[in-house]
Amino acid sequence: MTLAFTDDKPHDECGVFGVYAPGRDVARLTFFGLYALQHRGQEAAGIATSDGKSAYLHKDVGLVSQVFNEANMKPLIGSHAIGHNRYSTTGSSLLRNAQPFLIETIDGPLGVSHNGNLTNTLELRKMLLERGGGLQSTSDSEIMTLMLAAPVDAWSELKSNESNLDRWQQRILGLMRVAKGAYSLAILTRDAIYGARDANGLRPLCLGKLEGGYMIASETSALFTIGAEFVREIEPGEIIKIDAHGITSIKLEHDAPKALCSFEYVYFARPDSVMEGQVIHDVRQRLGRQLAKEAPVVADVVIAVPDSATPHGIGFALETGIPYTEGLIKNRYIGRTFIQPDQSLRELGMQLKYNPLRANLEGKRIVLVDDSIVRGTTSGPLVQLVRDAGAIEVHVRVASPMIKHPCFMGVDMATYGQLIAHNKTLEEIRVHIGADSLAYLSVGGLKNAIGEGSSLHHGHCTACFSGEYPIDIPAWLFGDTRDQALFEGSLT
Ligand code: SF4
């Protein structure tokens, strides 16, 4: 597959989904759930089902709508299912890394969908290989799958009060005691689905109820798409089991601070999703308002980089009273193509993706609001596009803080060497992108806008902005040596 048009955004994680609903077409429900979560991963998709006897799987590279059709969904029968949208965070995006992983174990089939990234992968890989496990991929999700297939006390001793748990609950608890980092899991066994969330709650996971059963999903937008009601979020460190007896919840004992990824609010989650009781769109408007308070500017109109920064731009306009208008029209379908542009098309650059609305820009002083800048590769061409359409001033406002640090918890951000805000000052970035003025939201402003500090919404990761990681990050991850380490001996 060819990625012809790259944006300058952090890339998501993945989307996970699971449903237990005997009598319903669970594969079809999962298909539409994944469809609603497509923004969380576009490289591969998969669905695994179980009918209580056997498990069935189809997965491939591509968008959900490309991977599935009526013919390949027909064999996906059963009472429960899990699904996955993949954007690779570890390992490459080859088919062998596509999820769910489905294997046969001593206790029947096991399917695993994982969103996140483990930070002690090398250690876990070593533990697994020393016990005779074999790995097919470079994915930490495969490591988790194989660790779950091992004997129930393989990775940590069971406590006396855990003997009444089922063997999968015991295994999941055992894995959670040794796995470090970010993971929201949807797990399929012969008779149940399980949802589990890491102790920090870095990646989201919620529970919904639909006619005939229950479901779990990365975001509430997937619930509403298939007619399910939101029940609640799965707590950090919680394991949910859904089977014929209903819902069972157990918790990992831990003292980890809650640290939901604040970038979910800035960019990742769908605007209609709800996290921590807050509609994402509303939070994004607050981010824009906060930015306007911190960095006002005299201008004629506010425009936003579509579509992701639209609510931030509206918030900025509402706070300042400067009219909001559309200034850039995005071709929504050009993000991914198999066709490479030739050299003359490539030179058109941003015009392949965005077209300026000249009538709204000509002769005007523009505030151009973006949600984030990672490498700084698209901001300059966008500013130029707006100038070429006749704008007399372009003031760039960014509704998140300067990204100075990489993410090791499941987001493909960039390395230190690639992050423009790690390597340049604010003024140097302004000159680099050719803006008349430039301002970012402060870290305090971000926390304020996402509700940090209120009793309900405390505890967010802001590490890519602040450098304060909520978990210990091994030193080797700070280098650009990860893939090298995976393939050179440090694994065994
Ligand atoms: S480092 Fe940034 S992108 Fe990664 S989990 Fe934390 S807030 Fe999210």
Image (spheres, grey):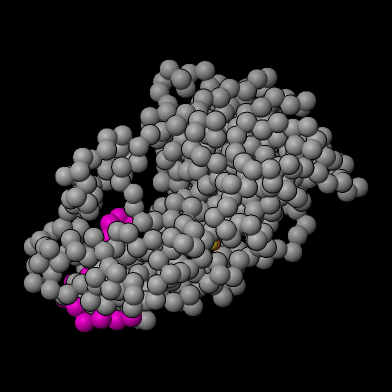
Residue 470 spot, x, y in % from top left: 63, 65
Q: Quadrant of residue 22?
A: top right
Residue at image position (39%, 61%) is 375
**Main secondary-structure element of the magenta-colored stretch:** loop
Relative to 14, is 131 on the left or the right? right
Relative to 364, is 171 on the left or the right? right
Relative to 435, is 268 on the left or the right? right
Residue at image position (27%, 43%) is 334
Task: Return the residue found at the far right.
Answer: 160
Decide if residue 184 is in sight here: no
Task: Return the residue found at the far front.
Answer: 488
Residue 321 spot, x, y in % from top left: 24, 78
Q: Is residue 457 magenta?
A: no
Decide if residue 113 is in sight here: yes
> Between 227 and 49, which is closer to the camera in this rendering?
49
Residue at image position (43%, 17%) is 71
Number of numbered tags placed on the structure image? 0
> Between 43 and 399, which is closer to the camera in this rendering?
43
Q: Quadrant of residue 141?
A: top right
Residue 456 spot, x, y in % from top left: 58, 68
Relative to 291, is 59 on the left or the right? right
> Between 172 and 323, which is closer to the camera in this rendering?
172
Residue 292 spot, x, y in % from top left: 33, 77
Q: Is residue 210 above or below residue 477?
A: above
> On the rendered image, what quadrant is the C terminus found in?
top right
Residue at image position (59%, 50%) is 482
> On the rendered image, what quadrant is the N terminus found in?
top left
Q: Quadrant of residue 401?
A: bottom left
- Point out the stretch of residues depicted in magenta: 295-308
